[in-house]
Image (cartoon, helix red, strand yellow):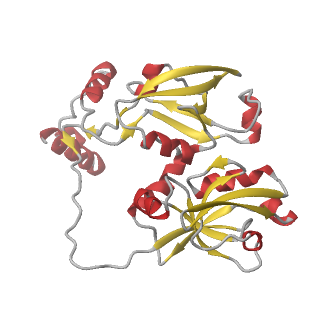
Amino acid sequence: MKTLIIAGAAAWAAALGLAQDVPPPAPPAPPAVRAVRARALLGGEGGSYLGIGVVEIEAERAKALKLSEERGVEVKSVDEEGPASKAGLKEGDVVLEYNGQRVEGTEQFVRMVRETPAGRQSKLLISRGGATQTVLATIGRRPRVQFGVFSIPEIPDPPRMLDIPRPAMGWRSSVLGIETESLESQLAAFFGVKEGVLVKSVAKDSAAGKAGVQAGDVIVKVDGTKVGTPREISNALKSGKKTIALTVVRRQKEMNLEVTLGDEHRRRGHMAPAIAGGLPENSELLELLDDRGEL
């Protein structure tokens, strides 16, 4: 506290031309000391943690990384003390598969890591310089960062005084003509699925509507590939096909529907967030922030 007061006084004295009356602050500790102290102050427990930052891979970047196709996520940063670093992952690596499941984008990859319990070993198929290899990483717990000698305490939830309406968050696809949302585990069990994307509404005369898709259906596969988020459906639509096969669960029974896409939609279609009633609630906001690829 004394150091902070002296540093503040020195700043005001310099501004008033009186710096000579105030002793200068003590010099900072050497870099090596600061680094050791910073590592010592990492602690606490959090969610599942791999210790890397990843980004989506575009077509041009896929060529630069010597990939045969546009898929996976690129590692842009590696925590020196994290599980990924201990497993040998490096910046510029591309994660192609996670525990045998093909990686399509950051949202899916973040979700898979988040759902892996801390302490469990995960197998990652990566590409490095165009050559593939397999690495094993033991998932850890996300550390809580402390600043200086002060830690940031967790803020408890405020007491619930009354029922307050919360905004609903959905994703609207101009390609299919549907509005969807991801299913939480409890809601997924209600519909009789482990994961999938709930159809909230279907536009009249849309491609999905003409194919027989109905509100209340749960999309579980696109062209035979499992989907768990609207983003994964959007990625599957980038293929440019004239028709796609949707596997949906309706009244806990699985059925296949063939959707014919219009030329204009296949060229420009994508999924965009649709927020009803204001900003998304906390859990949905975190899901949006996961697009940054930090896990």
Which residue is rendered at x = 17% and y = 38% of the image? 3
Left or right: 7 with respect to 136? left
Left or right: 280 with respect to 215? left
93 shown above or below 6: above
For the C terminus, the image quarter is top left
260 shown above or below 31: below
Residue lying at the far right in this picture: please name it.
Answer: 263
Q: Quadrant of residue 254?
A: bottom right
Q: Position of residue 189 (x, y in %)?
A: 44, 59
Which residue is rendered at x = 51% and y = 26% of the image? 123
Which residue is rendered at x = 35% and y = 34% of the image? 118
Q: Quadrant of residue 245?
A: bottom right
239 shown above or below 204: above
Q: Position of residue 36 (x, y in %)?
A: 28, 22
Q: Quadrant of residue 144?
A: top left
Q: Nearer the viewer, residue 262 or 152?
A: 262
Q: Position of residue 242 (x, y in %)?
A: 85, 58
For the N terminus, the image quarter is top left
> Can the viewer see residue 28 in this picture?
no
Which residue is rendered at x = 61% and y = 44% of the image? 105
Q: Nearer the viewer, residue 150 or 18?
A: 150
